[in-house]
């Protein structure tokens, strides 16, 4: 099964994709994570995307589609969760091509419907373990013991450079202008399923599971 998780910054795409990977063995393909890996590596592509990401703008369609294409084959057997891709009409069409070249298709586009005003709080409170990458939130998902990662015990944490209020608002504007307009492309094919992204993490998970279970 191949699914897209679609929603603005902070809607919970990464949270739900990581859960689906852990619980269902599907493969999370996050262009945001791939771009962060590229920038941390100091590669020429990494240097190019750093300024764009820090400004909250979109990286070029060519770069992100190349990154997805490289990883797609690893998600052949278990199915893919596209997290943060596609984000433009050109990316949506490129994904169709990448899938059809491999004899695969999209099963669902799951839209996380959220109230944008609440998302700034979600994003500016987010942090993750510097060692194992487990994600937390100051209020919504704190560590069990203050300052200690629940999973690996590390005491070092990081926050994303683009998780400040000004950049978050720019990222939301990019979502409204370039990403939300691709929904009709999928609606016309009957692929869109809506879940209430303002519910708790567990409730959102239950709604997504209900969609997936109904098609297995
Ligand atoms: P990317 O990393 O994809 O960021 P994003 O889309 O802005 O999404 P986020 O990771 O901020 O949010 P999320 O929806 O995953 O929410 P999360 O689960 O973490 O992209 C970053 C940048 O890379 C872009 O700005 C762009 O420059 C570039 N880029 C990436 N892909 C690209 C592409 N395809 N084309 C061009 N450029 C691209 O949750 C947020 C917080 O809320 C967490 O702390 C979580 O614990 C909490 N939370 C989650 N769910 C709930 C809930 N139900 N209730 C309460 N709290 C919750």
Image (cartoon, rainbow, N blue to C red):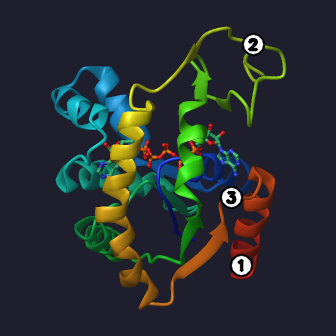
Name which residue lies at 55% across and 63% down: 79
**Is residue 211 found left or right of 180 in the rendered image?**
right
In which quadrant will I find the C terminus?
bottom right
* Above or below for 165 versus 102: above
Query: Sequence order check: which comes first, mark 3 or mark 1?
Result: 3
Residue 164 location, quadrant: top left
State yes or no: discs 2 and 3 in contact (Cβ < 8 Å): no
Q: Which of labels 3 and 1 is toward the front?
A: 3
In which quadrant will I find the N terminus?
bottom right
**Could you tell me which secondary element the residue under label 3 belongs to?**
loop
Query: In front: 23, or 52?
Result: 52
Say which residue label 1 marks. Answer: 216
* Above or below for 196 versus 108: above
Q: What mark, if any, has residue 66 been given in the picture?
A: none
The image position of residue 183, as x and y in percent, is: 41, 77
Name which residue lies at 19% across and 50% down: 60
Q: Which of labels 2 and 1 is toward the front?
A: 2
**Could you tell me which secondary element the residue under label 2 belongs to?**
loop
Say which residue label 2 marks. Answer: 148
Query: In front: 80, or 201?
Result: 201
Residue 144 location, quadrant: top right
Q: Residues within 10 Å of mark 1 (few under 14, many from 20)?
A: few
Say which residue label 3 marks. Answer: 198
Q: Which of labels 2 and 3 is toward the front?
A: 3
Query: In front: 191, or 124?
Result: 124
Mark 1 vs ligand 1: CB below 8 Å: no
Q: Most extreme residue toward the top, as rendered?
A: 155
Alpha-carbon distance for marks 2 and 1?
39 Å
Alpha-carbon distance for marks 2 and 3?
28 Å
């Amino acid at each position: 099964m191949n699914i897209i998780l679609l929603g603005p910054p902070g809607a919970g795409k990464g949270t739900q994709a990581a859960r689906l990977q852990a619980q269902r063995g599907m493969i999370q393909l996050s262009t945001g994570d791939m771009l962060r890996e590229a920038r941390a590596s100091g590669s020429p592509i990494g240097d190019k995307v750093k300024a764009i990401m820090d400004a909250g703008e979109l990286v070029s369609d060519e770069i992100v589609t190349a990154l997805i294409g490289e990883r797609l084959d690893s998600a052949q057997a278990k199915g893919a969760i596209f997290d943060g891709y596609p984000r433009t009409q050109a990316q949506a069409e490129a994904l169709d091509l990448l899938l059809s070249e491999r004899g695969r298709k999209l099963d669902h586009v799951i839209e996380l419907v959220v109230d944008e005003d609440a998302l700034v709080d979600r994003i500016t409170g987010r942090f993750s373990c510097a060692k194992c990458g487990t994600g937390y939130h100051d209020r919504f998902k704190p560590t069990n013991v203050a300052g200690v990662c629940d999973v690996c015990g590390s005491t070092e944490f990081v926050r994303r450079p683009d998780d400040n209020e000004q950049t978050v608002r720019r990222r939301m504007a990019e979502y409204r202008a370039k990403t939300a307009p691709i929904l009709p492309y999928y609606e016309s094919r009957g692929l869109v399923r809506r879940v209430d992204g303002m519910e708790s993490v567990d409730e959102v998970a239950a709604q997504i599971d209900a969609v997936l279970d109904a098609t297995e």
